[in-house]
């Protein structure tokens, strides 16, 4: 954290003080999209088992008002694969997979220093293979008892096909006071497999947030019909900074008539992957695997979104 007066650019280019606790307003809303710089640099250490006292801070906000406070948060981490460890990924050799997980006596970027990406690599380097389990929760530092029961650890296993693992906390609420800090904290575990002190996963910059809000909903609306339910072609990410994926509108609803207030939007949908194993069998008899990264975004529109509402009970976006 910098001293008062120190400023820096965050991900979207705004000027803000270092150590900022997130933007808030008098209507009871606080938002942080600026990840902790130490966690970005050093990564998130992988522990053998969950330890309530060992975690990394991702985002923090200042509680905007006293009362019942609702929280929402999301973050994305990356497993360390060969490109990350050797510094050939989009962020070069400055990521923690290269500088921390891949660090050995021969320098950084050593594949045999980090945890194995596959079972084959585990056998080659004589190490135990595991899929890291991501665990995150909302914490009120100095007031740990305030939200423990309502905002406990949530987990997601990051399987080897999932290079990027995005975790969306289901949301929670508890009583808090204005001026308290709230943090989204995270840890990773091997669920009992052997680990080394340099084993880390990488926190993705600019892919997450923490939101705290205290206003009670004045009005709510719900929509269950899809705008688009047809097949949507998966794309290959070339891992280049200028590449942008294609998007389709999945679901939409009208916002209640409000002025000068904020809205809380939550969405959920199911994706069904069309995958025929007979079309993806290798020469050695093994199957290809596919676990695509799905990106979503909430958009505000002044007009009607394109697409027609579905009329069937099939809610899957295939």
Image (tube, rainbow, N blue to C red):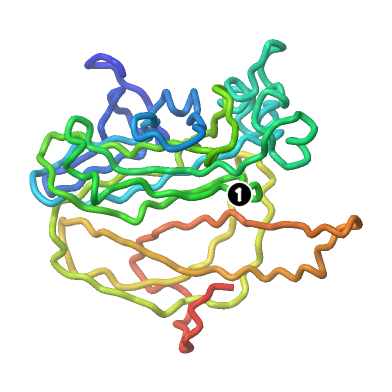
Observer-nearest of 96 and 138? 138
Q: Which residue is mark 1?
A: 159
Instruction: Report the residue that reaches farthest toward the bottom.
Output: 311
Is 151 positioned to the left or the right of 224 in the image? left
Where residue 109 appears, x then y in whole percent?
Answer: 68, 22
Q: In the image, what residue occupies the spot 58% across and 77% down? A: 230
Q: Position of residue 30 (x, y in %)?
A: 22, 43
Q: Does residue 304 lie above or below 61 as drawn?
A: below
Q: Residue 85: x, y in percent?
A: 67, 28
Does dot 1 land on a helix, a strand or a loop?
A: loop
Left or right: 13, with 64 as reference point: right
Q: Based on the displayed image, in which of its 4 quarters is residue 196 positioned?
A: top right
Image point (29%, 35%), residue name: 60
Q: Residue at x 63, y 68 (%)?
A: 273
Q: Can you say whether 251 is above or below 182 in the image?
A: below
Instruction: Assign the N terminus to one quadrant of the image.
Output: top left
Q: Residue at 90%, 55% (x, y): give it.
A: 284
In what quadrant of the picture does the C terminus appear? Answer: bottom right
């Amino acid at each position: 954290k910098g001293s008062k007066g120190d400023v820096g650019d965050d991900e979207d280019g705004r000027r803000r003080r270092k150590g900022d606790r997130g933007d808030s307003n008098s209507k009871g809303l606080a938002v942080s999209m600026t990840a902790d710089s130490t966690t970005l640099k050093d990564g998130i250490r992988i522990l053998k088992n969950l330890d309530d006292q060992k975690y990394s801070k991702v985002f923090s906000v200042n509680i905007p008002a006293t009362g019942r406070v609702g929280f929402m948060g999301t973050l994305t981490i990356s497993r360390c694969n060969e490109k990350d460890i050797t510094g050939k990924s989009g962020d070069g050799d400055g990521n923690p997979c290269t500088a921390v997980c891949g660090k050995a006596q021969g320098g950084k970027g050593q594949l045999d220093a980090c945890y194995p990406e596959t079972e084959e690599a585990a056998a080659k380097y004589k190490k135990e293979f595991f899929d890291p389990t991501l665990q995150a929760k909302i914490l009120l530092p100095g007031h740990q008892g305030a939200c423990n029961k309502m905002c406990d650890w949530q987990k997601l296993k990051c399987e080897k096909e999932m290079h990027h693992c995005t975790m969306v906390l289901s949301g929670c609420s508890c009583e808090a006071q204005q001026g308290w800090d709230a943090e989204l904290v995270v840890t990773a575990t091997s669920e009992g497999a052997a680990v080394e002190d340099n084993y880390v996963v990488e926190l993705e910059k600019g892919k997450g947030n923490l939101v705290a809000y205290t206003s009670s909903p004045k009005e709510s609306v719900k929509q269950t019909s899809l705008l688009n339910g047809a097949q949507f072609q998966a794309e290959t990410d070339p891992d280049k900074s200028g590449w942008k994926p294609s998007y389709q509108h999945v679901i939409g609803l009208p916002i209640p008539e409000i002025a000068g207030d904020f809205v809380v939007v939550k969405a959920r949908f199911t994706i069904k992957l069309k995958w025929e194993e007979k079309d993806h069998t290798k020469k050695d008899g093994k199957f290809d695997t596919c676990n695509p990264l799905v990106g979503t975004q909430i958009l505000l529109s002044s007009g009607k979104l394109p697409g027609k509402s579905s009329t069937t009970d099939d809610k899957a976006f295939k």
